[in-house]
Amino acid sequence: MVDITSKSNTFRQAIAIATVTVSKQETIDAILGKKVPKGDVFEFSRAAGLLAIKKTSDVIPDCHPLPIEYAAIKHEVAGLSILITVEVHTIYKTGVEVEAMHGASVTALTMYDMLKPLDKGVEIANIKLLQKSGGKSDKSLMDSSAINCAVVVCSDTVSAGKQEDVSGKTVIQKVEQWGVTVAHYEIIPDDQDQIQQLVKKFSVEGCKLILLSGGTGLSPRDITPEAVAPLIDRPIPGIMETARQYGQQRTPFAMLSRGVSGFVKNSLVITLPGSVKGVAETMDALFPQILHVFKVADGSRHE
């Protein structure tokens, strides 16, 4: 199974369809008149499809068990064909397209089983995914092509050459995978004046995104939040609330992070942990959805 532990829960939807075609009008009449000997074809197949949706992970080895928040199955008669439409919703880390297709398949197969004593020419066709939303399928909503970024590592030991920077490079790798251009990469000591000078400099130079790694903990030299907070014109508390909530699901120590975030002029500034694990988890919690803030900020979309 694919590892989805780094993903966040989001609303996900999928719609799948299948077509059952019979060979004579008498079969359609029997379905509509509820005269099929095995019972009400629409209701029996609907019940089977709902069970199939819920049991998908039991029969498809790589599918994750997930909560089904909503499922609906509809039948539409068109001539000698019956179109089955299955819609499934969840709020989870992975999508429900296989669940929807499994539901459509079993709904169709149940209809076949119920109709085969009456009609030897029943066929199942066109089982396919019609649409999905949520997760990576919404990536197009977040245009990152015009976003340039500055990455600043705040660490006495790294700036002194006593330790190699890994956290900053982790930040760079993660933002670049979403198409963001890293224009600046700096390593400085835990010094309030230097931190403030760099943030102001990059903001003036037009960096839309400024990410600082390190100095958000509780040691005496952790002063990044104190340096950045006075510069913020518009705080965005929800960013760090999301990061801490995400981290808290993985370690109880996430509550000790003191990161802050918000706009300095037109630059979004986010303070990240200094540990590799902490910075990676915070990036996973915030990206790519954080990129949507630039659409809202420049007025191209109103929220």
Image (cartoon, helix red, strand yellow):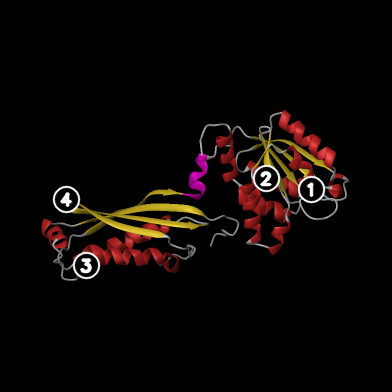
- Left/right placement of residue 226 relative to residue 43 reads right
Task: Check whether the beta carbons of the residues at disc 4 and disc 1 lie within 8 A of each other.
Answer: no
In the image, residue 58 sits, relative to residue 288, either above or below, namely below
Residue at 11% in and 59% down? 26
At label 1, the amino acid type is Asp
Extreme-left residue of the structure: 26
Task: Give the magenta range.
Answer: 134-141
Q: Residue 80, percent across and down?
A: 17, 53
Tag 2 secondary structure: helix
At label 3, the amino acid type is Met
Q: Residue 266, percent across and down?
A: 66, 32
At label 2, the amino acid type is Gln
- Left/right placement of residue 72 relative to residue 203 reads left
Q: Which mark is residue 79?
A: 4
Whether 246 is among the magenta residues is: no
Residue at 70% in and 59% down? 255
Classified by dominant secondary structure, the portion drawn in magenta counts as: helix
Whether 136 is among the magenta residues is: yes
Judge the density around disc 4: few (<14), some (14-19), many (≥20) Cα neighbours within 10 Å: few
Residue identified by numbered label 3: 114
Tag 3 secondary structure: helix
The quadrant holding residue 230 is: top right
Q: Which mark is residue 299?
A: none
Q: Which mark is residue 173?
A: 2
Q: Which mark is residue 165?
A: 1
Q: Earlier in the sequence, mark 4 or mark 1?
A: 4
Q: Earlier in the sequence, mark 4 or mark 2?
A: 4
